Amino acid sequence: MDLRRLQTFRTVATLMNFNRAAEVLNASQSTVSARIKTLEDEIGVLLFRRIGKTIRLTESGAKMLAYADKLLAIGDEAMAEITGRNAGSGLLTVRMPQTVTTCFLPSLLSEFHPRFPGLRLDITSCALYSLEHELRIGTVDLAFLFADTISAENLEAELLCVEPMVIVSHPDNPLAARESVDFKDLAGEILLLPKSDCGYRMEFEQSLMEQKVTPGSLIEMNNIEALKRTIMAGVGVTLIPEIAVRSELRQGSMARLNWADELEIGILMIRYRDKWQSPAVEAFMDAARQHIAVSGGRSQKPEK
């Protein structure tokens, strides 16, 4: 696949304008159009939908953009590795739950980024079902997940730490005054669950089904901060890593329910087994061991 065509495609997809892309690429508009047409013919799908004078990415075009970013970054990385110049360039794509991003990423980046100042970083939330495929094809370099294990033989998971989990509500929720709370007490309650933290919510829902407990309603949110604010507004209960609500519990804006059993979840660092890792990926993994494994709830001995 021609890298020049991919560069042209990415420029058009970023600017959403053929004429402006031609100016940036120092090429004629007809040349830009011809490169896009050749790329579409090569892969056999339309990448752009043309509506009057405007263009939009098709679904295939949106997928292609992720691959184009990665392929172009690999090209830059290969040149840097071969020539010894700009060793910190390229693209590093990491999937990471929002809670891990919020609580650990700032300190991790303070150590990592000065070593790779020219590196582009793409940090996205976790996607459990597509993770093995993304790591295999290289659209994702490294992933983190709230889970104790992962059942995929081609993936290598390293347990960084174990975090305590809590079930919380507004302090005025009647459940907050009980000496002990278990699954049956959640029947009829409004249950808030995150889409963005993955891992633990699946196990929690399975436990509810096994206990034959039906919540009053289920609200799914893609933003942990919005979920927390909803709890503080007096709506529902949620299961969440304690580290995400530690300050709210201390301030009294949330209440920790006296759950009958101890709850905890691991933070896994996941990569594709036996796949070559760039120096940037290795450095990011080392930084994660230092800032997650050491700072997390119950630390694990870092493994190489």
Image (cartoon, rainbow, N blue to C red):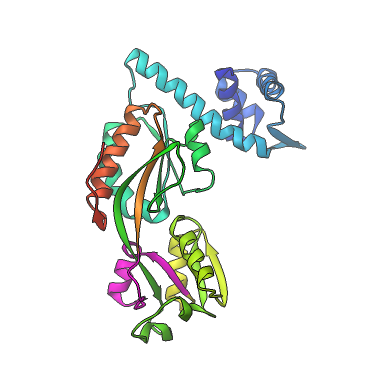
Pick whichever, 132 or 114, lies toward us: 132
Q: What percent of the width, then of the height, locates residue 164?
A: 31, 63
Side (left or right) of 291 relative to 226: left
In the rendered image, residue 8 lying in the magenta stretch gets the answer no
Q: What percent of the width, then of the height, locates residue 139?
A: 50, 34
Q: Residue at x 41, y 50 (%)?
A: 145
- Residue 250, picture quadrant: bottom left
Q: What percent of the width, then of the height, locates residue 89?
A: 37, 26
- Residue 26, picture quadrant: top right
The answer to whether residue 121 is visible is no
* Magenta stretch bounds: 237-263
Pick whichever, 122 or 151, lies toward us: 151
In the rendered image, residue 259 lying in the magenta stretch gets the answer yes
Relative vertical location of residue 92 with respect to residue 216 in this rendering, above or below: above
Q: Residue at x 36, y 14 (%)?
A: 82
State which quarter of the image contains the C terminus.
Answer: top left
Q: What percent of the width, then of the height, locates residue 91?
A: 43, 31
Relative vertical location of residue 295 with respect to residue 206 in this rendering, above or below: above
The residue at the far right in this view is 52
Pick whichever, 53 or 243, lies toward us: 243
Q: Residue at x 26, y 55 (%)?
A: 296
- Residue 11, picture quadrant: top right
The answer to whether residue 138 is visible is yes
State which quarter of the image contains the N terminus.
Answer: top right
The residue at the far top in this view is 83
